[in-house]
Image: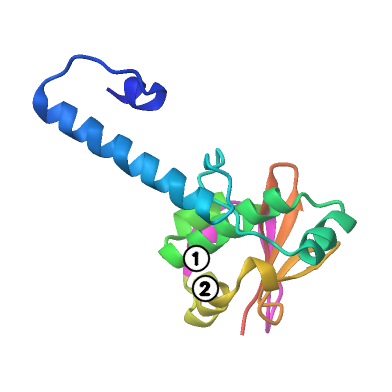
Amino acid sequence: ITGSLATGAAQAREPKLQMLYDRHRALNLLGRELRHSMDLPVKTPEAGFSRPKLSPEVEAGFRDLTFDPLEAYYGFRRVKAAFRSGDVELLSRVAHYPLTLTGKTRRTIRNREQLVAAKDKVMDAHTREVVAKSTFATVFVRDKGMMLGEGEVWITPGKTGFGLGLINLP
């Protein structure tokens, strides 16, 4: 079934499965039409996030720093989703190591285990709120990456794309 859903090929199946298949196809077509009406790509990108339409100035700002706006957006959405979930394990997968924590003291997180151990500091309410309120079109961008809020969180470029690079703790 999953193969036929992906390719759109019709197969003989029992009525209950046919109903699910038809519902999936209808939702897929509805989503495509909605995306088309919003001037978004009809097919969602492989990363699963659709990128909002950005002004030429915002796109030029990323390109001037040799950042791919689409790659930067995927990194932004992954970090934002990890903070929104409140799951430090998920956050550990979108972080670039060594991850720097600054505040009263400076600390370097070298691996996932250390990040999980520092969950209470990393996932504090203020930092999560700053990330939740940030929008891609309004982030400050410079050669080091994207700054969320007043510098509480930095999303930095790396070998595997953009990821969490620095957290300034209150």
What's drawn in magenta, residue-wise?
Answer: 97-119
Horizontal side, residue 114 vs residue 89: left or right? right
Is 158 placed above or below 128 here? above
Name the residue nearer the viewer: 1 or 134. Answer: 1
The secondary element bearing badge 1 is classed as helix
Kind of residue indicated by mark 1: Phe
Q: Could you tell me residue 49's position as x and y percent? A: 53, 50
Q: CA distance from mark 1 to mark 2?
A: 8 Å
Horizontal side, residue 4 vs residue 119: left or right? left
Q: Indicate yes or no whether the magenta region holds residue 56.
A: no
User: Residue drawn at (48%, 67%), measured in percent from left and top?
Assistant: 119
Name the residue nearer the viewer: 62 or 54. Answer: 54
Horizontal side, residue 10 vs residue 91: left or right? left
Q: Can residue 144 be seen here?
A: no
- Mark 1 and mark 2 lie on one chain; the one further toward the N terminus is 1
User: Residue drawn at (51%, 74%), measured in percent from left and top?
Assistant: 128
Disc 1 + disc 2, Cβ < 8 Å: yes
- The residue labelled by disc 2 is 132
The secondary element bearing badge 2 is classed as helix
> Quadrant of residue 154 in the image?
bottom right
Q: In the rendered view, how is the structure colored?
A: rainbow
Q: Indicate yes or no whether the magenta region holds residue 108.
A: yes
Q: Could you tell me residue 20's position as x and y percent? A: 20, 34
Q: Residues within 10 Å of mark 1 (few under 14, many from 20)?
A: many
- The residue labelled by disc 1 is 83
